[in-house]
Image: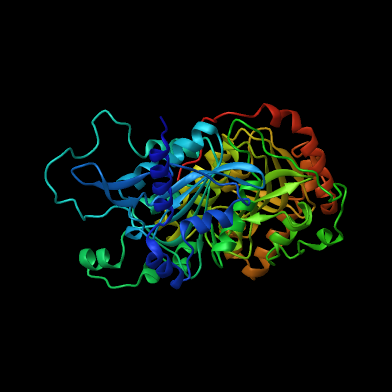
Amino acid sequence: MSWEKEVRELERRRALAKRQGGERGIAKQHAKGRLTVRERIDALLDADSFFEHGRATAVPDYDDDGELLGYVPANYVVGFGEIDSRRVVVGGEDFTLKGGSPNAAGLRKSIYAEHLACQYRVPLVRMLEGGGGSVKGSGKKGGTVGQPVFSEPRFRIIADAMGEVPIASGAMGAVAGFPAGRLVASHFAVMTRHTAQVLIGGPALVTRALGVKMTKDELGGAQVHAASGIVDNVAEDEHDAFAQIRRFLGYLPPSVWERTPRLASDDDPERMEQALLTAVPRDTNQPFDMRAIVEMVMDSGSFFEMGAAFGQSQICGLARLDGQPVGVLANDNRHAAGAMTAEAAQKYRRFVEMCDTFHVPVVNFVDQPGFMIGPAAEQAGTIRYGMAAVSAATQATVPWAVIQVHKGFGVATAAHYAPDAYVLAWPSVETGALPLEGGVAVAFHREIAKAKDPAAKRRELEEQLRSARSPFPAAESFAVHELIDPRETRPFLCRWIEWIQPRLETLTGPVRFTMRP
């Protein structure tokens, strides 16, 4: 006796599932300049590496004799694949069916994605395009409703996954409701510039609830969410988004139970860039290009910035240093003089927690004038977010190197030092309780006011105190490990990378404070 009939039926159902929303639905998706979920998976992964889970999962319709009348595929596709020969889990909504709003089968598969990644300890990539739940069908009576009271909260696995495996999510079209929640519950989120929107509620819902009429782009387009911090980066198109996801994952281990992947580097660890000697102007109030400094120190072309348009006074990104992945923090003095704003502090905390979660050592280029001040800063709750950033750094467990580049003032500077940090100082650094100009104005306000020429008296006091802020006494007092020629920064850091290798071998497993959305 053979099971050939049943096998043929199984093959037929698998074929039906791959038809997605049919030729019409696929054509409609293409007409809007967007790929289907299966095309996205193929474009992201190494060729022929996708192994789907639940290939015959669907919402079937049977007649009274048990014969199949209709077959609606699960509108979520999930499975294993490979990126640069490393296994990942990839999943995403099928927008050609119900606009990505999950049917019963699709919802089960979408929830399974995080479980699968955590079970096998591999990264998770989400291709998001969908509107979350729908009220259609909710008026039907009869049958069971809701989730059993003993079931685990659906969002528990989403939160747990962030502390176990790297998660990268891409918004490829309109993303609202539950998919929008999944997007931000990621270590790296990217959206396409012209075809994606991220929304808590769409235009119709906003108009009905608030009486406000806006388009999807006005509500949640790329120009909105690059600045809001909802996404880390904006991609020019879907293929650019795939490339950024692939690159991001290349710096991280498969899970917290493995160490970061160090690669062979052809960039000389002893390389010394002459331009570093003049990178910081002698005029303490003249801005300079911190990103150029980072690029000159890190392995050539390896710096991958995240969140450039949000919290712009703080630079965050991943790079390699003599082949070792590192998290890079730096202040951008061309925005708010590099001060820690509420937004910059939020960005800083999340990035530090991500590096700590995956045991990525941190290199911090410091030019910190302090917390942002003024009425807007007070209204934004800057001190609360700033202290959260300080706490993240001071409780970090990864190796940490600090390069004192320019300024280091006030409580905000504490965010730049983790326990046992390796501290290097440049001759251009100036540190203290307050920036000199503001500190003199406060401490000597009576003396300045009584002077015949208050402005001249203020400058005189500033110059007297500035000479006392030289980095040489700190080096002489062993308050820093080394005072170095800026050109020596890369060689010193590459030696530090070698010193920390035994420690990185032991830094595996979950940390006490993992990253959360």
* Residue 203 visible: yes
The percent coordinates of residue 471 (x first, y second) are 77, 48
Q: Residue furthest left?
A: 141
Left or right of residue 480: residue 71? left
Can you say whether 254 is above or below 364 in the image? above
Task: Identify which residue is drawn at 50% across, 38% down.
Answer: 117
| Applied colour scheme | rainbow
Left or right of residue 177: residue 277? right
Which image quadrant: the N terminus? top left
The percent coordinates of residue 28 (x first, y second) are 40, 69
Task: Identify which residue is drawn at 75% across, 28% down.
Answer: 502
Question: As rendered, which of 161 and 12 lies closer to the eye?
Answer: 12
Question: As rendered, which of 261 and 504 lies closer to the eye?
Answer: 261
Task: Identify which residue is drawn at 40% across, 48% down.
Answer: 12
Task: Identify which residue is drawn at 60% across, 38% down.
Answer: 254
* Residue 372 visible: no
- Where residue 376 sits, quadrant-wise, is bottom left
Left or right of residue 209: residue 434? right
Can you say whether 474 is above or below 198 in the image? above
- Where residue 279 sits, quadrant-wise, is bottom right
The percent coordinates of residue 329 (x first, y second) are 64, 50
The percent coordinates of residue 423 (x first, y second) are 73, 41
Q: Residue furthest front?
A: 1
- Where residue 362 sits, quadrant-wise, is top right
Report the label total.
0
